[in-house]
Image (cartoon, grey):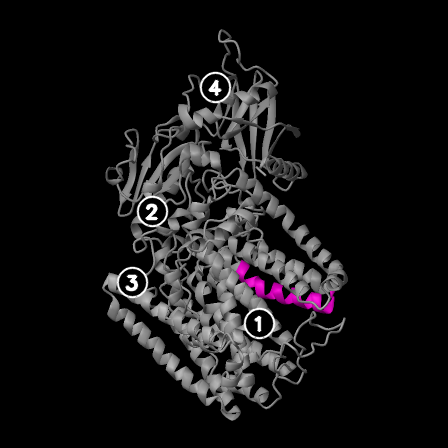
Amino acid sequence: MASIASIRSLVMPMSQLPMYHSPTPHSPVPSSPTSDMPAPRFPSPPASIGWTRETTIRTLTIIFAFWLVTALVWPLTGAVVPWDSKNHFYPMLRYLGASLEAGEWPLWNPYHFSGYPSVADPQSLLFTPSMVLFGWLMPQASMQLFDIAVYAHFLPGALGIVGLFKRRGWHPAGAIVTVMIYILGGSASARLQHTGMIFSYGYFPLALFLLESSLGRRSYVRAVAFGVIASLMALGRDQVAYLFCLALIGSVVYQIATAQAPLAYLRSRIGLLAVMAATGGALLAVPALLTIQFLSDSNRPMIDFATAGMGSLPPQSLATAIFGNIFGSLNLTYDYWGPGPHTLPEGTWTDRAIDYLFIGTVPAMLILWHGIGGGRLLSREFRFFLFVGIGALIYALGYYTPVFELFYRYIPGVDLYRRPADATFMLNFAFAMAAGYLVHRFMAEGVPKRADVERNPASPLLVVLAVGLTAAAIINASRFAIAAGKLPEAMIQIGLGAFIAFIAAALIIAGRRPAMRVYACAALIAITGGDLILRNAASALNAEPRERYAVFEQLPSDQLRGLQVLTRELAARHAEGARPRVEILGLQGAWQNASMVLGLEDTLGYNPLRIADYERAVGPGENAADASLRQFPITFRNYRSRLASLLGLEYIVLDRPVEKMPSQFPHLPQARLIYGAGTMWIYKMPPRTPRAYLATRLVPVESERVLKEQGLPDLEHSDEALIDVADIKDLNNRYGLGDVSETQEPPSGKAIITRYRRNSVRIRVVTDKPAMLVLHDIYYPGWQVTVDGEEKPIRRANLLFRAVEVPAGRHMVEFRYEPLSLHNLATAAADLLEDKERAPR
C-alpha cells in the first residue's frame, strides 16, 4: 500500500495552488464549441490545479501500487479466488487455451452437458479478447495467474476514473480514494468470483470517460474508441454489462438535457453518436445474436417476475456498507447471521457475498456527514453520479420497492436476468465516485460550513436522513444479532467502526486549517486503503486455499488413482472405436467442470444456461455437485434407459457408493464397480449404442409428447431411429414409414468415425442401401453436414441428436459446427424477428 509520505508528496503541491470551487446555480457557465467539456458544465479548472503531467503520473503510480499490492495478497497467502471463479471460469479458460493450442476455436464444447455451444455462452470467455490472448499465451495457466489476469481488468476502469476526475478538475486525492473503493469495495471484492461481471465492471469507467470526452471534444477518434471499449464491456452480456449500458445511455441523455440548447447540442453531435452506435453494433451484433439464439433454445429464455424478485437485495444489507462485518460476513467460520434464506420470512436467493457492500469506514462517514448531512452530494457537478447511485439502489432492492416491477414490465431486457442485486456493482461505483468527490471538496473547502448548510432549506431533512440511515443500520444489525445470539460480536464491529470514524473525524476537523489539510487527507487515504485491504483482500468472501481446487493441480491420492483407472478404461474403449460418455456426480467444487480440462465427455456440468431439450430429456440440473439436483425425467428414468444408452453413457463417477446416494437416485444393477475409495466411486455400465450408426427404418414420434408424457420408446431393431412426425415430409426416402407391412433388411455396411474434433466429426460410411446416418451428438443450430463434400440438410433423430440421409455406396460424411456462417446468422436473425412478431403487444 502507498505510504502516507508518498501520498503527501502528491497532495502537497496541489495544496499550494488555487483550488476550484463549484459555481453557484446563478453563476455563468462559459461554453465553447471546442471545449473538452459538454455544455453546460462547471468550467474546466486551469492546468495548474493539480493535474499537471507530473501529478497525473504520480496519481497513476500510487493507484498501480495499490492495485499490485492488493493483487499479490492472494498468492502470498496461498489463496485463490474461489467458487465460480474456479468451478466455472477457470475450466473455461483452460478449455479455451487447449483449443487454441490445438489450432481450433472452441466454438463447441463436447465435454460439457454432452455438447454445448460455447460460442453462444457469455461466460465462455471466447469474446473476451484479453482472455483469448491470455489463453493463447498460457494455455495451462495456473489458478494464481488466472486470478491476476482477471484482477488486471480493474486497471482500465482505474484509468477511466482518473480521466473522469481530471476532466472535472477534481482533486487527484479523490481519484485515489475512488479507485481504492472501485477495486476493493462492496461487490467488486465480495463477488470477485463472478469473473464475467468483473470484466464488464472493469471497462465501464473508461467507457464513460471516452463517451464524455468524445462528446466534449467532438472527437471521432474518441467516438470509435468509446465504441470499442463499450463493446468490450457489453460483450459479457450479463446483467452488470446491461445496467452499465443503460448508464451510458443515461449519460448521453443527461448531457443533452442539461445543455443550454439541447436540440443544437444534439444536432452538433449526431454524427458522433452515429459512429459510436455503428462501432458498437458492428462488434456486438454477432455475439449478441448467437446468445439470443441460445436463449431462445435454452432452459431460461426469460425470468418471471417472482423468480427475479427472489434475487433482490434485502434492505437490511445496506448496514454492511457502513459496518463491514456487522453480520459475520467475513468470518472464516461461515457463521453468517445476516439477511438470508434462513433469516428472512419472505426468503431470498442472495447470500452473504451478494449482500456485502462495505466501502470503507472513512468513505462511509464522508458520505453520511459531508455528502448527505452537509448536502454536498446534491451539487450540480455530481448530479449525474447521484442519479446513477439512486437508480442502482432502487434496482438492486428489486421487489422491496414498487419501482422495480415497472422496470421489469417496461424496460426491454430486464426480464432476461434473475438477480436485481447485481446492480450493487453499479452502486459500488457510485459510492466510490461519491467518496472521491467528497475528498475533492474537503481539499478545496474543508468541512461543510454552517453558513452554507443553513442556507439550504433542506438541510434539516438531510441531517435527519444521515442520522436516520446510521441508526437504521445499527438497529437492523442488532435485531439480526439478537436473533442469532451474536449481539456481542455485532457490538464489537459497531465499536470498531465508531473508533475508526472518530479518528477520521478528528483528522477532518484538524483539516479545517489549510496548512493541515494535506496531512489529514494523506492520513485518510492511508486509513481507507488499509481498512479495505485488511477487510476485503483475500477475505472469507473471495479467497480459499488453493488446495481445495486440487483437481487442477495435485489430486488427493484416492481421486488420482480413480482418475487413472478411468482414463485407462476410456483409452481402451477409444482404441476399440467407441466414444463412451461419463457422468460425474456428487464430487465437489472444481470437479463439476473439470471434464473440460481432463478431456472427459461429461453428460453433466456446472452452468446456469443449458440447451432446453437436453435439460428436459436428461435432467442434468445447474450443477453436478449436489446429487439431489439431478433429475430423472420420464425420458431418463435411470441409467438403463434408452436415452442413457443413446448417449453412450458407460461410466458413472460418484462421490460415494451408490448404496449411499439420495433415495431418488436410481439403482445400478447392471453396473460393475471398477474403482472405489474415499470420495471417488466409478461404475461401468455395459457397452451402449454406438456413437454413429446407420438406420434404414424410421419410427415416427411427436417429440413434445415424448418429452412431456410418453417417454422414449424402445427401438426393436438396431437399424431403427426415431424421427419427429413434422420432419417426415422433408425426407428423400421412406425408410419403412407409412406401411407397417413393409420390411426393411438391415443395411450391409458400417459407419466409422475417422476424426473427432471439437467443431467437426468425420465419418466414413459404407452402405448397400439408402440410410439415415445417426450421430449421437447433440443437435443444435449452426451444425452443418456434407456428404462427399456436398452440403446436405441436417436432420434431428432419436430426440436430441444429429443425422443425415446418405445414399447407397461409400461416402465421407462430415458434420461441422459453423455458427458464424451467414446461413446460421441469417436464420437466427429471422427467428428473432419472428419471435418479436409473435410476442404479445
Q: Earlier in the sequence, mark 3 or mark 2?
A: 3
Residue with the mark numbered 3: 480
Residue 54 locus on image (x, y percent): 62, 83
Task: Look at 57% across and 74% down and name the residue there.
Answer: 379
Residue at the far front in the pictured view: 457
SS for callout 2: loop
Determine whether label 4 and label 3 are within 8 Å by CB: no
SS for callout 3: helix
> Considering only vertical position in the picture, is 299 above or below 228?
above
Task: Look at 27% across and 39% down and name the residue there.
Answer: 662
Report the front residue among 466 and 617: 466
> Considering only vertical position in the picture, is 228 above or below 106?
below
Task: Give amino acid for label 3.
Answer: Phe
Residue 679 locus on image (x, y percent): 29, 47
Residue with the mark numbered 1: 382
Q: Earlier in the sequence, mark 2 or mark 4?
A: 2
Residue with the mark numbered 4: 720
Q: Is residue 47 magenta?
A: no
